[in-house]
Amino acid sequence: MKQLLLITILSFVTITNAQEKTLTLKDAIKYALENKAEAKKAQLKIENSEYQIQEVRSRALPQITANGNLTYNPIIQTTVIDGAGFGQPGTTIQAAFGQKWTSTAGVSLTQALFDQSVFTGLKAARTTREFYQINNQLTEEQVIERVANNYYQVYVLRQKLALAESNLKTTTKVRDIVKGQFDNGLAKKIDLDRMTVNLSNINTQKQQIINSVQLQENALKFYIGMPMDAEINIPQSEFEVTPAAFSDVPNVANRSEYLILKKQEELLELQKKSVIAGYYPTLSLSASYNYIGQGPEMPWLKKPSDGVYWTDFSAIGLNLRVPIFSGFGTRAKVRQADVELRTIQEDIKDTQLSLDLDYKNAKTQIENSIITLQNQKENMRLADEILKNINNNYLQGLASLTDLLDAENASTEAQNNYTAAILDYKLAEIKLIKSKGELRTLLNN
Protein backbone atom coordinates (compact mmCIF):
# COMPACT_ATOMS: atom_id res chain seq x y z
CA MET A 1 0.00 0.00 0.00
CA LYS A 2 2.87 2.37 0.82
CA GLN A 3 4.45 1.67 -2.57
CA LEU A 4 1.10 2.24 -4.31
CA LEU A 5 0.62 5.52 -2.44
CA LEU A 6 4.13 6.66 -3.38
CA ILE A 7 3.54 5.84 -7.06
CA THR A 8 0.23 7.74 -6.97
CA ILE A 9 1.88 10.81 -5.43
CA LEU A 10 4.73 10.75 -7.94
CA SER A 11 2.25 10.39 -10.82
CA PHE A 12 0.25 13.37 -9.54
CA VAL A 13 3.38 15.50 -9.26
CA THR A 14 4.43 14.49 -12.78
CA ILE A 15 1.02 15.40 -14.24
CA THR A 16 0.99 18.70 -12.36
CA ASN A 17 4.44 19.61 -13.65
CA ALA A 18 3.46 18.58 -17.18
CA GLN A 19 0.48 20.94 -17.06
CA GLU A 20 2.69 23.89 -16.14
CA LYS A 21 3.73 25.81 -19.24
CA THR A 22 7.01 27.72 -19.42
CA LEU A 23 5.93 30.94 -21.07
CA THR A 24 8.47 33.28 -22.61
CA LEU A 25 7.28 36.63 -23.95
CA LYS A 26 7.69 35.31 -27.50
CA ASP A 27 5.55 32.25 -26.65
CA ALA A 28 2.89 34.42 -25.04
CA ILE A 29 2.67 36.70 -28.08
CA LYS A 30 2.50 33.79 -30.54
CA TYR A 31 -0.19 32.12 -28.44
CA ALA A 32 -2.21 35.35 -28.38
CA LEU A 33 -1.95 35.90 -32.14
CA GLU A 34 -3.17 32.34 -32.74
CA ASN A 35 -5.93 32.23 -30.13
CA LYS A 36 -7.12 35.73 -29.16
CA ALA A 37 -10.48 36.78 -30.59
CA GLU A 38 -9.26 40.18 -31.82
CA ALA A 39 -6.53 38.60 -33.94
CA LYS A 40 -8.90 35.98 -35.34
CA LYS A 41 -11.56 38.56 -36.20
CA ALA A 42 -9.00 40.72 -38.01
CA GLN A 43 -8.07 37.69 -40.12
CA LEU A 44 -11.74 37.04 -40.85
CA LYS A 45 -12.15 40.61 -42.08
CA ILE A 46 -9.37 40.01 -44.60
CA GLU A 47 -11.14 36.86 -45.75
CA ASN A 48 -14.43 38.74 -45.98
CA SER A 49 -12.81 41.46 -48.12
CA GLU A 50 -12.17 38.82 -50.80
CA TYR A 51 -15.89 38.12 -50.94
CA GLN A 52 -16.60 41.86 -51.16
CA ILE A 53 -14.36 42.03 -54.22
CA GLN A 54 -16.25 39.11 -55.77
CA GLU A 55 -19.54 40.85 -55.03
CA VAL A 56 -18.50 44.07 -56.80
CA ARG A 57 -16.92 42.12 -59.67
CA SER A 58 -20.26 40.36 -60.21
CA ARG A 59 -21.80 43.70 -61.25
CA ALA A 60 -19.53 43.70 -64.30
CA LEU A 61 -20.50 40.16 -65.30
CA PRO A 62 -23.68 39.07 -67.15
CA GLN A 63 -26.80 38.84 -64.99
CA ILE A 64 -28.95 35.91 -66.08
CA THR A 65 -32.35 35.16 -64.58
CA ALA A 66 -35.12 32.70 -65.29
CA ASN A 67 -38.72 33.70 -64.77
CA GLY A 68 -42.12 32.16 -65.00
CA ASN A 69 -45.70 32.96 -64.11
CA LEU A 70 -49.20 31.57 -64.25
CA THR A 71 -52.16 33.97 -64.44
CA TYR A 72 -55.88 33.33 -64.25
CA ASN A 73 -58.24 36.09 -65.42
CA PRO A 74 -61.73 35.48 -64.01
CA ILE A 75 -63.01 38.58 -65.82
CA ILE A 76 -61.27 39.59 -69.01
CA GLN A 77 -61.04 43.30 -69.56
CA THR A 78 -63.35 44.68 -72.28
CA THR A 79 -61.86 47.13 -74.74
CA VAL A 80 -64.03 49.70 -76.57
CA ILE A 81 -62.92 50.36 -80.17
CA ASP A 82 -64.20 52.31 -83.20
CA GLY A 83 -66.15 50.06 -85.54
CA ALA A 84 -64.74 51.88 -88.58
CA GLY A 85 -61.69 49.73 -88.39
CA PHE A 86 -63.85 46.67 -88.89
CA GLY A 87 -65.96 48.03 -91.74
CA GLN A 88 -68.69 49.33 -89.41
CA PRO A 89 -68.28 53.13 -89.41
CA GLY A 90 -70.38 55.02 -86.91
CA THR A 91 -70.52 52.10 -84.53
CA THR A 92 -68.67 51.18 -81.34
CA ILE A 93 -67.46 47.67 -80.74
CA GLN A 94 -66.83 46.20 -77.31
CA ALA A 95 -64.35 43.34 -77.43
CA ALA A 96 -62.61 41.26 -74.80
CA PHE A 97 -59.01 40.49 -75.72
CA GLY A 98 -57.07 37.74 -74.07
CA GLN A 99 -57.70 34.35 -72.54
CA LYS A 100 -58.78 33.12 -69.15
CA TRP A 101 -55.42 31.46 -68.56
CA THR A 102 -51.92 32.67 -69.42
CA SER A 103 -48.57 31.10 -68.51
CA THR A 104 -45.12 32.45 -69.38
CA ALA A 105 -41.62 31.02 -68.93
CA GLY A 106 -38.39 32.64 -70.08
CA VAL A 107 -34.78 33.64 -69.58
CA SER A 108 -33.41 37.18 -69.50
CA LEU A 109 -29.86 38.53 -69.64
CA THR A 110 -28.46 41.93 -68.70
CA GLN A 111 -24.86 42.98 -69.32
CA ALA A 112 -23.41 46.30 -68.22
CA LEU A 113 -21.39 47.82 -71.07
CA PHE A 114 -20.45 51.07 -69.38
CA ASP A 115 -21.03 51.96 -65.74
CA GLN A 116 -18.44 54.17 -64.08
CA SER A 117 -19.67 53.24 -60.59
CA VAL A 118 -18.82 49.57 -61.25
CA PHE A 119 -15.23 50.38 -62.23
CA THR A 120 -14.80 52.63 -59.19
CA GLY A 121 -16.39 49.97 -56.99
CA LEU A 122 -13.80 47.40 -58.08
CA LYS A 123 -10.96 49.74 -57.13
CA ALA A 124 -12.65 50.46 -53.79
CA ALA A 125 -13.06 46.75 -53.07
CA ARG A 126 -9.36 46.07 -53.68
CA THR A 127 -8.44 49.04 -51.50
CA THR A 128 -10.76 47.71 -48.79
CA ARG A 129 -8.81 44.44 -48.81
CA GLU A 130 -5.58 46.40 -48.34
CA PHE A 131 -7.25 48.37 -45.53
CA TYR A 132 -8.15 45.19 -43.67
CA GLN A 133 -4.62 43.84 -44.16
CA ILE A 134 -3.22 46.96 -42.47
CA ASN A 135 -5.94 46.76 -39.83
CA ASN A 136 -4.87 43.18 -39.14
CA GLN A 137 -1.29 44.38 -38.69
CA LEU A 138 -2.45 47.14 -36.33
CA THR A 139 -4.58 44.67 -34.35
CA GLU A 140 -1.62 42.33 -33.98
CA GLU A 141 0.52 45.20 -32.71
CA GLN A 142 -2.16 46.14 -30.17
CA VAL A 143 -2.33 42.52 -29.00
CA ILE A 144 1.47 42.36 -28.72
CA GLU A 145 1.64 45.58 -26.68
CA ARG A 146 -1.12 44.48 -24.31
CA VAL A 147 0.38 41.03 -23.81
CA ALA A 148 3.89 42.40 -23.20
CA ASN A 149 2.67 44.92 -20.61
CA ASN A 150 0.69 42.30 -18.69
CA TYR A 151 3.50 39.78 -19.00
CA TYR A 152 5.96 42.11 -17.27
CA GLN A 153 3.43 43.01 -14.58
CA VAL A 154 3.09 39.33 -13.68
CA TYR A 155 6.86 39.14 -13.34
CA VAL A 156 7.02 42.10 -10.94
CA LEU A 157 4.32 40.67 -8.72
CA ARG A 158 6.09 37.30 -8.64
CA GLN A 159 9.31 39.05 -7.68
CA LYS A 160 7.47 40.82 -4.87
CA LEU A 161 6.05 37.49 -3.74
CA ALA A 162 9.52 35.93 -3.70
CA LEU A 163 10.78 38.90 -1.71
CA ALA A 164 7.90 38.58 0.77
CA GLU A 165 8.65 34.87 1.25
CA SER A 166 12.35 35.64 1.79
CA ASN A 167 11.50 38.36 4.32
CA LEU A 168 9.11 35.97 6.03
CA LYS A 169 11.86 33.39 6.50
CA THR A 170 14.34 35.99 7.76
CA THR A 171 11.84 37.56 10.15
CA THR A 172 10.79 34.13 11.43
CA LYS A 173 14.41 33.35 12.28
CA VAL A 174 14.81 36.66 14.10
CA ARG A 175 11.52 36.13 15.96
CA ASP A 176 12.75 32.68 17.06
CA ILE A 177 15.99 34.23 18.30
CA VAL A 178 14.10 36.90 20.24
CA LYS A 179 11.75 34.25 21.67
CA GLY A 180 14.77 32.23 22.83
CA GLN A 181 16.23 35.32 24.44
CA PHE A 182 12.89 36.08 26.07
CA ASP A 183 12.61 32.54 27.41
CA ASN A 184 16.08 32.93 28.92
CA GLY A 185 15.27 36.34 30.36
CA LEU A 186 17.55 38.20 27.95
CA ALA A 187 14.83 40.05 26.01
CA LYS A 188 11.70 41.98 26.90
CA LYS A 189 8.20 40.79 26.10
CA ILE A 190 7.59 43.95 24.09
CA ASP A 191 10.45 42.97 21.80
CA LEU A 192 8.87 39.56 21.21
CA ASP A 193 5.46 41.20 20.63
CA ARG A 194 6.97 43.63 18.11
CA MET A 195 8.53 40.76 16.18
CA THR A 196 5.24 38.82 16.27
CA VAL A 197 3.36 41.84 14.91
CA ASN A 198 6.00 42.37 12.22
CA LEU A 199 5.78 38.71 11.23
CA SER A 200 1.97 38.92 11.05
CA ASN A 201 2.18 42.01 8.84
CA ILE A 202 4.56 40.27 6.43
CA ASN A 203 2.20 37.27 6.29
CA THR A 204 -0.68 39.60 5.46
CA GLN A 205 1.37 41.34 2.75
CA LYS A 206 2.34 37.97 1.30
CA GLN A 207 -1.30 36.89 1.10
CA GLN A 208 -2.25 40.15 -0.61
CA ILE A 209 0.54 39.68 -3.15
CA ILE A 210 -0.55 36.07 -3.77
CA ASN A 211 -4.03 37.37 -4.58
CA SER A 212 -2.61 40.09 -6.85
CA VAL A 213 -0.43 37.53 -8.66
CA GLN A 214 -3.44 35.31 -9.31
CA LEU A 215 -5.50 38.21 -10.63
CA GLN A 216 -2.69 39.43 -12.89
CA GLU A 217 -1.99 35.93 -14.19
CA ASN A 218 -5.69 35.53 -15.00
CA ALA A 219 -5.56 38.84 -16.88
CA LEU A 220 -2.52 37.64 -18.84
CA LYS A 221 -4.24 34.36 -19.70
CA PHE A 222 -7.27 36.32 -20.89
CA TYR A 223 -5.18 38.63 -23.06
CA ILE A 224 -3.48 35.69 -24.77
CA GLY A 225 -6.62 33.53 -24.99
CA MET A 226 -5.32 30.79 -22.67
CA PRO A 227 -7.64 28.65 -20.46
CA MET A 228 -7.84 29.99 -16.90
CA ASP A 229 -6.90 26.64 -15.34
CA ALA A 230 -3.56 26.50 -17.20
CA GLU A 231 -0.41 26.88 -15.08
CA ILE A 232 2.29 29.19 -16.42
CA ASN A 233 5.92 29.72 -15.51
CA ILE A 234 7.78 32.88 -16.55
CA PRO A 235 11.57 32.41 -16.81
CA GLN A 236 13.86 34.93 -15.13
CA SER A 237 15.97 35.47 -18.26
CA GLU A 238 13.14 37.41 -19.86
CA PHE A 239 13.92 40.48 -17.76
CA GLU A 240 17.54 41.26 -18.39
CA VAL A 241 17.96 45.00 -18.77
CA THR A 242 19.73 45.81 -22.04
CA PRO A 243 20.74 49.24 -23.38
CA ALA A 244 17.96 50.82 -25.40
CA ALA A 245 18.62 51.40 -29.08
CA PHE A 246 18.04 55.07 -29.84
CA SER A 247 17.96 56.34 -33.36
CA ASP A 248 16.76 59.34 -35.27
CA VAL A 249 13.06 60.11 -35.20
CA PRO A 250 11.41 57.15 -36.95
CA ASN A 251 9.47 57.60 -40.16
CA VAL A 252 5.82 57.75 -39.12
CA ALA A 253 4.83 56.73 -42.66
CA ASN A 254 5.78 53.18 -41.63
CA ARG A 255 3.50 53.12 -38.59
CA SER A 256 0.30 51.10 -38.87
CA GLU A 257 -1.72 53.91 -37.28
CA TYR A 258 -0.62 56.25 -40.09
CA LEU A 259 -0.95 53.69 -42.88
CA ILE A 260 -4.51 52.82 -41.94
CA LEU A 261 -5.53 56.50 -42.06
CA LYS A 262 -3.89 56.90 -45.47
CA LYS A 263 -5.81 53.87 -46.71
CA GLN A 264 -9.03 55.38 -45.32
CA GLU A 265 -8.19 58.56 -47.22
CA GLU A 266 -7.84 56.52 -50.40
CA LEU A 267 -11.18 54.84 -49.75
CA LEU A 268 -12.88 58.21 -49.24
CA GLU A 269 -11.40 59.46 -52.52
CA LEU A 270 -12.88 56.44 -54.27
CA GLN A 271 -16.17 57.04 -52.50
CA LYS A 272 -16.20 60.59 -53.86
CA LYS A 273 -15.46 59.27 -57.38
CA SER A 274 -18.27 56.75 -56.99
CA VAL A 275 -20.70 59.58 -56.19
CA ILE A 276 -19.39 61.64 -59.14
CA ALA A 277 -20.10 58.58 -61.31
CA GLY A 278 -23.77 59.49 -60.85
CA TYR A 279 -23.21 62.24 -63.43
CA TYR A 280 -22.06 59.71 -66.04
CA PRO A 281 -24.44 57.90 -68.44
CA THR A 282 -24.77 54.14 -68.23
CA LEU A 283 -25.12 51.69 -71.08
CA SER A 284 -26.27 48.10 -70.86
CA LEU A 285 -27.33 45.25 -73.11
CA SER A 286 -30.49 43.27 -72.44
CA ALA A 287 -31.84 40.14 -74.07
CA SER A 288 -34.72 37.79 -73.31
CA TYR A 289 -36.35 34.69 -74.67
CA ASN A 290 -39.83 33.62 -73.49
CA TYR A 291 -42.46 30.97 -74.13
CA ILE A 292 -46.13 31.78 -73.55
CA GLY A 293 -49.19 29.61 -73.41
CA GLN A 294 -52.79 30.96 -73.58
CA GLY A 295 -56.20 29.38 -73.53
CA PRO A 296 -59.51 28.91 -71.72
CA GLU A 297 -57.95 26.29 -69.47
CA MET A 298 -54.76 26.15 -67.42
CA PRO A 299 -52.09 25.86 -70.16
CA TRP A 300 -49.81 23.36 -68.47
CA LEU A 301 -49.62 20.06 -70.36
CA LYS A 302 -52.34 21.22 -72.76
CA LYS A 303 -52.39 21.20 -76.58
CA PRO A 304 -54.09 23.19 -79.36
CA SER A 305 -56.79 20.53 -79.40
CA ASP A 306 -57.64 21.74 -75.90
CA GLY A 307 -57.79 25.34 -77.11
CA VAL A 308 -54.38 26.15 -75.63
CA TYR A 309 -51.70 27.59 -77.88
CA TRP A 310 -47.97 27.97 -77.08
CA THR A 311 -45.76 30.51 -78.83
CA ASP A 312 -42.31 31.94 -78.23
CA PHE A 313 -40.98 35.48 -78.42
CA SER A 314 -37.66 37.22 -77.76
CA ALA A 315 -36.10 40.68 -77.62
CA ILE A 316 -32.62 42.23 -77.69
CA GLY A 317 -32.01 45.84 -76.70
CA LEU A 318 -29.52 48.51 -75.71
CA ASN A 319 -30.43 50.58 -72.66
CA LEU A 320 -28.95 54.05 -72.31
CA ARG A 321 -29.50 56.09 -69.16
CA VAL A 322 -28.38 59.72 -69.18
CA PRO A 323 -28.84 61.64 -65.92
CA ILE A 324 -30.01 65.20 -66.57
CA PHE A 325 -31.27 66.65 -63.31
CA SER A 326 -31.42 65.03 -59.87
CA GLY A 327 -32.59 67.96 -57.82
CA PHE A 328 -28.96 68.75 -56.84
CA GLY A 329 -28.90 65.49 -54.83
CA THR A 330 -25.73 64.23 -56.52
CA ARG A 331 -23.98 67.55 -55.97
CA ALA A 332 -24.84 67.43 -52.26
CA LYS A 333 -23.46 63.88 -51.98
CA VAL A 334 -20.23 64.93 -53.70
CA ARG A 335 -19.79 67.81 -51.27
CA GLN A 336 -20.45 65.50 -48.30
CA ALA A 337 -17.78 63.11 -49.59
CA ASP A 338 -15.37 66.02 -49.98
CA VAL A 339 -15.94 67.11 -46.36
CA GLU A 340 -15.25 63.58 -45.13
CA LEU A 341 -12.07 63.52 -47.20
CA ARG A 342 -10.83 66.80 -45.74
CA THR A 343 -11.69 65.55 -42.25
CA ILE A 344 -9.53 62.43 -42.61
CA GLN A 345 -6.71 64.59 -43.95
CA GLU A 346 -6.82 66.63 -40.74
CA ASP A 347 -6.75 63.36 -38.76
CA ILE A 348 -3.63 62.33 -40.69
CA LYS A 349 -1.85 65.57 -39.79
CA ASP A 350 -2.80 65.19 -36.13
CA THR A 351 -1.70 61.55 -36.10
CA GLN A 352 1.70 62.52 -37.49
CA LEU A 353 2.20 64.92 -34.58
CA SER A 354 0.90 62.35 -32.11
CA LEU A 355 3.28 59.63 -33.33
CA ASP A 356 6.25 62.00 -33.15
CA LEU A 357 5.18 62.89 -29.61
CA ASP A 358 4.97 59.20 -28.68
CA TYR A 359 8.58 58.66 -29.76
CA LYS A 360 9.89 61.73 -27.94
CA ASN A 361 8.06 60.79 -24.74
CA ALA A 362 9.09 57.14 -24.94
CA LYS A 363 12.73 58.11 -25.44
CA THR A 364 12.64 60.49 -22.46
CA GLN A 365 10.83 57.96 -20.29
CA ILE A 366 13.27 55.15 -20.95
CA GLU A 367 16.27 57.42 -20.36
CA ASN A 368 14.82 58.37 -16.98
CA SER A 369 13.94 54.74 -16.25
CA ILE A 370 17.55 53.65 -16.82
CA ILE A 371 18.82 56.30 -14.39
CA THR A 372 16.19 55.31 -11.80
CA LEU A 373 17.00 51.63 -12.26
CA GLN A 374 20.70 52.20 -11.68
CA ASN A 375 20.00 54.27 -8.55
CA GLN A 376 17.57 51.71 -7.13
CA LYS A 377 20.01 48.88 -7.77
CA GLU A 378 22.70 50.71 -5.79
CA ASN A 379 20.19 51.54 -3.03
CA MET A 380 19.22 47.88 -2.81
CA ARG A 381 22.87 46.84 -2.49
CA LEU A 382 23.53 49.38 0.26
CA ALA A 383 20.32 48.51 2.15
CA ASP A 384 21.20 44.81 2.04
CA GLU A 385 24.72 45.54 3.30
CA ILE A 386 23.34 47.70 6.13
CA LEU A 387 20.87 44.98 7.10
CA LYS A 388 23.62 42.36 7.32
CA ASN A 389 25.77 44.62 9.51
CA ILE A 390 22.92 45.57 11.86
CA ASN A 391 21.80 41.94 12.07
CA ASN A 392 25.31 40.93 13.17
CA ASN A 393 25.43 43.82 15.62
CA TYR A 394 22.03 42.85 17.03
CA LEU A 395 23.13 39.26 17.62
CA GLN A 396 26.18 40.63 19.45
CA GLY A 397 24.06 43.05 21.46
CA LEU A 398 25.49 46.13 19.74
CA ALA A 399 22.23 47.22 18.01
CA SER A 400 18.64 47.57 19.21
CA LEU A 401 15.63 45.71 17.86
CA THR A 402 14.31 49.00 16.51
CA ASP A 403 17.47 49.41 14.42
CA LEU A 404 17.06 45.87 13.09
CA LEU A 405 13.39 46.37 12.17
CA ASP A 406 14.16 49.69 10.50
CA ALA A 407 16.96 48.07 8.50
CA GLU A 408 14.66 45.21 7.43
CA ASN A 409 11.96 47.64 6.31
CA ALA A 410 14.52 49.75 4.44
CA SER A 411 15.92 46.66 2.70
CA THR A 412 12.43 45.46 1.75
CA GLU A 413 11.48 48.89 0.43
CA ALA A 414 14.71 49.13 -1.59
CA GLN A 415 14.11 45.72 -3.18
CA ASN A 416 10.48 46.58 -3.99
CA ASN A 417 11.59 49.89 -5.49
CA TYR A 418 14.16 48.11 -7.64
CA THR A 419 11.54 45.62 -8.83
CA ALA A 420 9.13 48.47 -9.62
CA ALA A 421 11.96 50.24 -11.50
CA ILE A 422 12.43 47.14 -13.66
CA LEU A 423 8.72 47.21 -14.52
CA ASP A 424 8.87 50.92 -15.38
CA TYR A 425 11.88 50.26 -17.60
CA LYS A 426 10.26 47.35 -19.43
CA LEU A 427 7.01 49.26 -19.98
CA ALA A 428 9.01 52.24 -21.27
CA GLU A 429 10.92 49.84 -23.53
CA ILE A 430 7.64 48.58 -24.99
CA LYS A 431 6.53 52.17 -25.68
CA LEU A 432 9.83 52.94 -27.39
CA ILE A 433 9.61 49.82 -29.55
CA LYS A 434 6.01 50.71 -30.44
CA SER A 435 6.92 54.32 -31.29
CA LYS A 436 9.50 52.98 -33.75
CA GLY A 437 6.93 50.63 -35.33
CA GLU A 438 8.93 47.56 -34.32
CA LEU A 439 6.57 45.68 -31.97
CA ARG A 440 6.69 42.59 -34.16
CA THR A 441 10.42 42.28 -33.43
CA LEU A 442 9.39 40.91 -30.02
CA LEU A 443 8.43 37.75 -31.88
CA ASN A 444 12.08 37.30 -32.84
CA ASN A 445 13.51 37.62 -29.32
Image: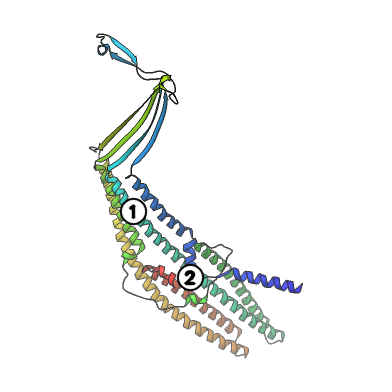
Residue at 52% across, 83% down = 383
Residue labelled with disc 1: 126
- Residue 186 lies, in percent from the top left, at 68, 87
Which quadrant holds the N terminus? bottom right
Q: Amino acid at mark 1?
A: Arg
Whether residue 234 is situated above or below residue 57 in the rendered picture = below
Disc sitting over residue 193 in the figure: none
Q: Earlier in the sequence, mark 1 or mark 2?
A: 2
Rendering coords of residue 400 (x, y %): 60, 86
Can residue 219 be seen in the rendering of this structure? yes
Q: Nearer the viewer, mark 1 or mark 2?
A: 1
Q: Residues within 10 Å of mark 2 (few under 14, many from 20)?
A: many
For this rendering, which residue is in front, 112 or 33? 112
Q: Looking at the image, what colour scheme do you see?
A: rainbow
Q: Is residue 228 left or right of residue 113?
A: right
Q: Which mark is residue 25?
A: 2
- Towards the viewer: 25 or 195: 25
| Quarter of the figure that contains the C terminus | bottom left
Q: Is residue 207 visible?
A: no
Most extreme residue toward the right is 1
Depth check: give the residue in front, 9 or 391: 9
Task: Judge from the rendering whether residue 97 lies leftward or rightward of residue 391; answer left or right.
Answer: left
Q: Judge left or right: residue 259 versus residue 427.
A: left
**Hey, which quadrant is residue 439 in on the image?**
bottom left
**Where does the image place residue 241, in percent across and percent down from the top left?**
45, 78
Pointer 1: residues within 10 angstroms few (<14), some, or many (20+)?
some
Q: Position of residue 36 (x, y in %)?
A: 49, 60
Secondary structure at badge 2 equals helix
* Distance CA(mark 1)–CA(mark 2): 35 Å
